[in-house]
Amino acid sequence: MQRLLMVLLLLCSTQVFAAGLQIREGYIRELPPGQTTSAAYMDLVNGSDKSIAIIGASSDSAGTAEIHNHQHNNGMMQMVAVRRLEIPARGHILLAPGSYHLMLINLKHSLHAGEQVGITLFDEQGKFYPVKITVVKTVGADAPKP
Ligand SMILES: [Cu+2]
């Protein structure tokens, strides 16, 4: 009986793992009221044997959601839109301050700590990945892990 339970548990965990993209450790920094843009950070973990390419995003709380990266250009940091973000098979891509991030443009309201923001990522295969990301209060410029 115990063995059967073990097998069942293994099967269940395998299924979750094979589901593809997992979105972990997501957070959005709380910003002063009146800001019209913000950024969401998260770890995109690909548990499958095939690469997953994210080609778009949307959010309940923003007019537009875009994947951005930072690029050094003549000593200046610039943000560039990323049209296709490929997460390698069994790999992950971290969206973090100073690197990849999900830009929320034309916010519909001020985002307050504790609030959950609905975000959906779309991949090249037409699959979508809805997730709720929590707004957190941060101290200073460094964003702590929630
Ligand atoms: Cu940006």
Image (cartoon, rainbow, N blue to C red):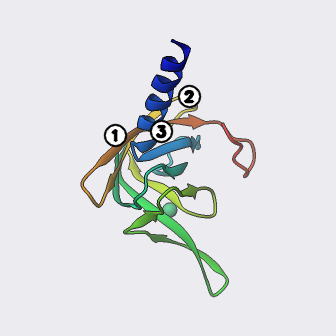
Q: Give the mark nearest the N terminus, 1 or 2.
A: 1
Q: Residues within 10 Å of mark 1 (few under 14, many from 20)?
A: few
Q: How many marks?
A: 3
Expressed as whole percent of the image width and height from the top left, the position of residue 99 reads 60, 64
Q: Residue at x 58, y 44 (%)?
A: 31
Which dot, 3 or 1, sits closer to the camera?
1
Three-letter amino acid code at the position of disc 3: Ser
Q: Give the mark nearest the N terminus, 3 or 1.
A: 1
Location of mark 2 (residue)? 114
Q: Residues within 10 Å of mark 3 (few under 14, many from 20)?
A: some
Q: CA distance from mark 1 to mark 2?
A: 16 Å
Q: Nearer the viewer, residue 70 or 106?
A: 70
18 relative to 96, above or below: above
Location of mark 1 (residue)? 60
Expressed as whole percent of the image width and height from the top left, the position of residue 131 reads 41, 38
22 relative to 103, above or below: above
Q: Nearer the viewer, residue 35 or 10?
A: 10
Q: Which mark is residue 110?
A: 3
Asked if the residues shown at circle 1 and circle 2 are in contact, with their CB atoms under 8 angstroms apart, the answer is no
Which quadrant of the structure image shows residue 124? bottom left
Expressed as whole percent of the image width and height from the top left, the position of residue 46 reads 47, 52
Q: CA distance from mark 3 to mark 2?
A: 12 Å
Q: Residue at x 39, y 42 (%)?
A: 19
Q: Residue at x 53, y 19 (%)?
A: 3
Three-letter amino acid code at the position of disc 1: Asp
Expressed as whole percent of the image width and height from the top left, the position of residue 43 reads 55, 50
Three-letter amino acid code at the position of disc 2: Gly
